Image: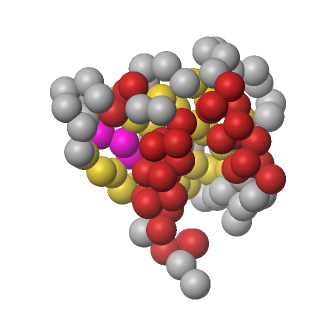
Amino acid sequence: MDDEPLIDDPDYAALVARLEREGYRITDWLAAVPVQLRGFLPTGEAFYFRCRYRTCSLRVAPTDGEPVAHPAWRNEVSRWDEFGAGCIEAEEAEAVLRELLANYPGTRR
């Protein structure tokens, strides 16, 4: 990981470690409102995962691209109360991230 997180949370730190063992490169993360993970997928694309208000979203861009400003692909899921998504625990964040990734064409087999 390039940077230390802004909020130290052992469950999110464990999530980041699991993702990195799977080949993700996490460049920064935040375990407080909004929940955020940013880095690179194992396939090299840049990604930005964010949970805020009622929605979690995933944006993906080419390796040299900017996933926030210029995503080549994006997807989101909304299922929480007004501020619920920004307060999800690491276990739920991981499940939602994997759900969104399952819809990304670059990860389909």
* 75 or 84: nearer the viewer: 84
Say if 69 sits above or below 53 in the image.
Answer: below
Q: Horizontal and vertical percent for residue 95?
A: 48, 52
Residue furthest out toward the left: 82
Q: Which residues are magenta?
A: 55-59
The scheme the figure's colours follow is secondary structure
Instruction: Locate residue 31, reporting x and y percent.
Output: 55, 24
Q: Is 57 contained in the magenta span?
A: yes
Q: Which image quarter: residue 30?
A: top right
Residue farthest bottom in this picture: 109
The C terminus: image quadrant: bottom right
Q: Quadrant of the N terminus?
A: top right
Count of numbered tags? 0
Q: Is residue 23 magenta?
A: no
Give me the residue at 44% from left, 60% from top. Answer: 99
| Quadrant of the rendered image containing residue 100 | bottom left
* Residue ID at (43%, 51%): 96
Residue 56: name its quadrant.
Answer: top left
Identify which residue is drawn at 30% across, 51% down: 77
User: Observer-nearest residue: 61 or 31?
Assistant: 31
Of helix, strand and loop, which mostly describes the magenta segment?
strand
Q: Residue at x 61, y 15 (%)?
A: 7
Give percent across and percent down for residue 61.
55, 54
Q: Is residue 54 visible from the viewing direction of this image? A: yes
The answer, for residue 63, to whether it is visible in the render is no
Position of residue 52 measured from the top left corner of the image (x, y, whole percent): 34, 30
